[in-house]
Image (cartoon, rainbow, N blue to C red):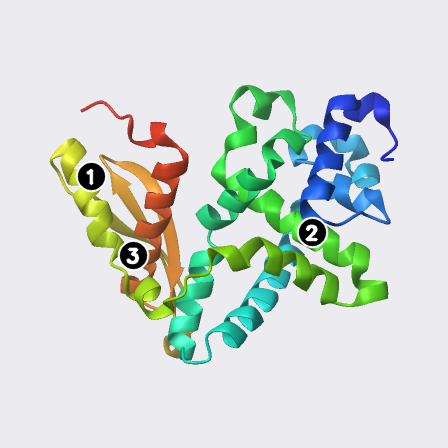
Amino acid sequence: MYGAKEEIGKMIEKEWSQLCKHLDYQFKCPEFLRQALTHKSFIPSETEKYYGNNERIEFLGDAVLDLVISEMLMEKFPELDEGKLSKFRASLVSETGLSQQARKLGLGKCLLIGRGEEVTGGRQKTSLLADTFEALMAAIYLDSREEHGISTITRVIHALFESHLPDDAECYITRDYKSELQEHVQKIFGMPSTYELMEESGPDHDKEFTMAVFVKEKECGRGVGASKKMASQLAAENALLRIKNEPSLLQIEK
């Protein structure tokens, strides 16, 4: 089905087949799938142009997710204003949120990565999984757009995300993740988590802030928002999700 079996191996090909079944989508051009699941570390520089990796289509996947999820939230929650919709979307498409989706799909087992990434646990890295998920969404869009426009990728994204949408959106959005994280960290270490502004960008009327939360000097989550307060809440939410998915995250010497 995918060609180049001598490189991919039967095990990877089996994982790719299972992934397509899980997504309920079969690629007409399997090269898109291969590109989405190929980390830059897998391909030698002299052949990179021929095979391609997922760095460029990851960029497109980010935009596709923003569009489809924005429309989905507007349709499902007509009572929410722009600010609350933005916060809701930011939570769903955060690095931690997307890596959670990637883990449910088993993307770690599907990746083509270099030996260096393999030995350092690349298949389970939150950032790598989130990037791969974005690339996979772009691959489905590119493979289906000529015949179906955006309808196919919309169906796939809805199927993946709708089960994560709460019935009470107001309660979900106003949940105090900073307090929850603080309580959790206080129980373990007897000290507070700390927040740091990592980046500030955009004009004065449209600022964007990136905040990171640290536990004993170890970064546990990041968030991006229109205010430091919103970004901090998203950073705390991402940290809580990471702690849930990666129990070893807080295994720090006391």
Image quadrant holding the C terminus, namely: top left
| SS assignment at label 2 | helix
The answer to whether 182 appears left or right of 113 in the picture is: left
Percent x, y of residue 188? 18, 32
From the image, tell me which residue sits under label 2.
57
The quadrant in which the N terminus is found is top right
Q: Nearer the viewer, residue 157 or 203?
A: 157
Image quarter of residue 146: bottom right
Q: Residue at x 24, y 38 (%)?
A: 215
Which residue, given by chain and number where applicable, does mark 3 sit on? 232
At 37% from the left and 48% from the top, the residue drawn is 238
**To which quarter of the image does residue 201 belong?**
bottom left
Mark 3 and mark 2: Cα distance apart in space: 29 Å
- 96 in relation to 73, above or below: above
**Can you say whether 239 is above or below 123 in the image?**
below
Question: Which residue sits at x=30%, y=57%?
Answer: 233
**Mark 1: amino acid:** Val
Bin the neighbour count of mark 2 within 10 Å (Cα to Cα): few under 14, some 14-19, many 20 and up: many
**Above or below for 110 versus 9:** below
> Above or below — where is 234 with respect to 11?
below
Residues under numbered marks 2 and 1 in contact, where contact means CB atoms less than 8 Å apart: no
Q: In the figure, residue 206 lies in which quadrant?
A: bottom left
In this view of the protein, can residue 234 be seen by the observer?
A: yes
Q: Is residue 114 left or right of residue 202?
A: right
Give SS at disc 1.
helix
Which of the labelled discs sits on residue 185, or is there none?
1
